Image: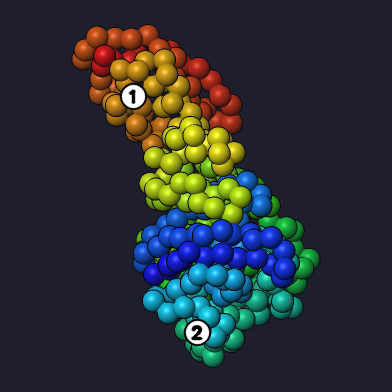
């Protein structure tokens, strides 16, 4: 469990980056922190893994203040992915990089080598390749893989899909999702609201070093006031449902307008074809383009 109690934070003698921040993340949660650059998200992540200490307040990991824990103790439980993989990669080959975490933790055994082999196969890495000669996307994948392979209790990700193409992004999020399903607590900073909507179960929105919203993902991302204050663009499915609610207020409390995925919305539409029809426009995603489909919507 991670807990922030009235946390303030600043770099050197500069103005505070965080002001009176408080929240609790329970074991096994998948939480996304969202907001514009400079909102305090990355600083919050650094406080979680002990790289930064609060100027006021308390950050606790499993009930113990991080100020009372050694960095090595935190590292055994908390994996951290930097936004820039070049700040993390430090070895001469891909295999050495994947083994580095085990070596640092004194766990370099046969089981560790087996896990590294599996990770190399999954990501289709060249085990003998020099990491800094890889392209940006592959370096990001390697940095993430080097954390995941040690199976930390908490996985902190600062923009994990930065520099990745669509296929790489899907592969990375698939691995993160699998880790979460096995019980890993996932805390993610992410600017891609589609990724947030697809994976996070809870969203904490920040602006100017403070939390402006904390709740279930689609509850937060459908709140127009929060979107405005945090300067966010809602996932497409939220935009669709909000447009529906505006055009047909009677639908605002139905499964159609509350759907969290396009499939859910289509199933909800199919399930309402028994009563009075409304001719309404639904926007949905078809490949990479927005198209308009004329749908019969019900329930007034």
Q: Quadrant of the C terminus?
A: top left
Left or right for 38, reference 234:
right
Residue occupying the far left of the picture: 274
> How many numbered callouts?
2
Q: From the viewer's perspective, is the residue at label 2 or at label 1 nearer?
A: 2
* Depicted 86 relative to depicted 262: above or below: below
Give residue 298's position: percent from left, percent from top: 28, 15
Asked whether 170 or 13 is in front, the reply is 13
Q: Residues within 10 Å of mark 1 (few under 14, many from 20)?
A: some
Q: Residue at x 32, y 20 (%)?
A: 251
Q: Tell me the tag on residue 68.
A: 2
Q: Residue at x 55, y 35 (%)?
A: 228
* Depicted 22 relative to depicted 48: above or below: above
Q: Quadrant of the N terminus?
A: bottom left
Give residue 276's position: percent from left, percent from top: 24, 9
Along the polypeptide, which appears first: circle 2 or circle 1?
Answer: 2
Residue 211 can be seen in this image: yes
Give residue 248's position: percent from left, percent from top: 37, 15
Image coloring type? rainbow
Q: Tell me the tag on residue 64.
A: none
- Helix, strand or loop at label 1? It is loop
Residue that carries the numbered disc 1 in the rendered image: 252
Left or right for 297, reference 152:
left
Q: Residue at x 28, y 26 (%)?
A: 254
* Depicted 143 relative to depicted 77: above or below: above
Q: Residue at x 39, y 40 (%)?
A: 219
């Amino acid at each position: 469990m991670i807990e922030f109690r009235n946390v303030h934070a600043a770099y050197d003698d500069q103005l505070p980056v965080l002001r009176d921040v408080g929240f609790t993340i329970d074991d096994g949660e998948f939480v996304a922190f969202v907001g514009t650059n400079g909102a305090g998200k990355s600083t919050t992540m650094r406080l979680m893994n002990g790289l930064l200490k609060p100027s006021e307040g308390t950050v606790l990991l499993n009930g113990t203040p991080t100020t009372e824990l050694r960095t090595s103790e935190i590292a055994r439980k908390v994996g951290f992915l930097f936004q820039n993989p070049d700040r993390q990669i430090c070895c001469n080959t891909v295999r050495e990089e994947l083994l580095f975490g085990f070596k640092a933790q004194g766990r370099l055994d046969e089981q560790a080598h087996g896990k590294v082999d599996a990770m190399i196969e999954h990501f289709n890495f060249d085990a003998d390749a020099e990491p800094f000669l890889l392209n940006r996307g592959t370096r990001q994948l390697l940095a993430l893989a080097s954390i995941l392979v040690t199976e930390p209790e908490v996985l902190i990700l600062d923009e994990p899909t930065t520099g990745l193409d669509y296929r790489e992004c899907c592969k990375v999020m698939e691995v993160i999702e699998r880790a979460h399903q096995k019980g890993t607590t996932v805390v993610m900073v992410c600017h891609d609201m589609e990724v947030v909507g697809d994976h996070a179960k809870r969203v904490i929105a920040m602006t100017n070093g403070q939390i402006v919203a904390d709740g279930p993902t689609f509850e937060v991302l459908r709140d127009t006031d929060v979107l405005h204050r945090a300067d966010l663009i809602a996932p497409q499915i939220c935009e669709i449902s909000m447009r529906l609610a505006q055009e047909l207020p009677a639908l605002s409390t139905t499964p159609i307008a509350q759907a969290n995925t396009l499939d859910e919305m289509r199933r909800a539409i199919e399930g309402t074809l028994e009563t009075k029809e409304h001719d309404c426009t639904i926007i949905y995603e078809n490949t990479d383009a927005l198209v308009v489909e004329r749908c019969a919507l019900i329930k007034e």
